[in-house]
Amino acid sequence: MPHAKEHPLAGRRVVPDAMTGEEIRIVDWIDRLPGGLALLHPDHPVARTFRRRLAVLDLHASGAVLARSTAGLTLVHHAELPSYDPVPVGMIS
């Protein structure tokens, strides 16, 4: 079942790994994008790298988020992304 709402960081630039300092732009949850789930196919090079990280981190592919990096498209798990506050400090909703 696809995520009902876009990822809270969609359209934003984040640095998921402070060690590398690489900045990525979050597109959205992979299951919300037309044809996006094809990127999870085991033969896709982006999926192979992503699945190796998932195995090491003991995470599930349902948390896949599509992002753009300087190298092109990449997949990250939402748990690898910086935390986000849906209501920033000082905002009244």
Image: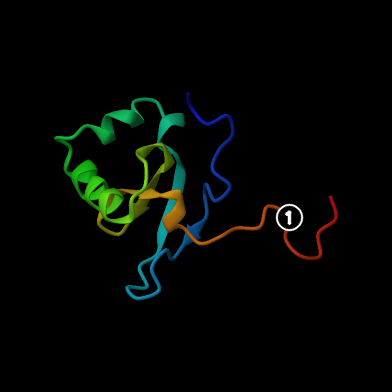
Q: Residue furthest bottom?
A: 19
Q: Is mark 1 on a helix, strand or loop?
A: loop
Image quadrant of residue 34?
Answer: top left
Q: Is residue 87 above or below residue 21?
A: above
Q: Foreground: 26 or 42?
A: 42
What x and y, as percent, mark residue 41?
22, 32
Seen from the viewer's position, the closer of residues 65 and 23 is 65
Q: On the picture, is 72 further left or further right than 63?
A: left
Q: Which residue lies furthest to the right in this view?
A: 92
Residue pointed to by mark 1: 87
Q: Is residue 5 positioned above or below 68 on the image? A: above
Please give the name of the residue rendered at 43% of the width and 42% of the height, measured from the top-left corner: 63
The residue shown at (45%, 44%) is 27
Q: In this view, does 92 lie to the left or right of 42?
A: right
In the image, what residue type sits under mark 1?
Val
Q: Which residue is at the far left?
A: 43
Residue 84 in the image, given as x and y percentages of width and height: 60, 58
Q: In this view, does 31 lie above or below 54?
A: above
Please state the horizontal and vertical placement of residue 52, each as a whole percent of the image. 22, 50
Please name the colour scheme applied to the rendered image.
rainbow
Image coords of residue 19 (percent x, y): 35, 76
Callout 1: few (<14), some (14-19), or many (20+) C-alpha neighbours within 10 Å? few
Q: What's the residue at 37%, 73% (across, down)?
A: 21
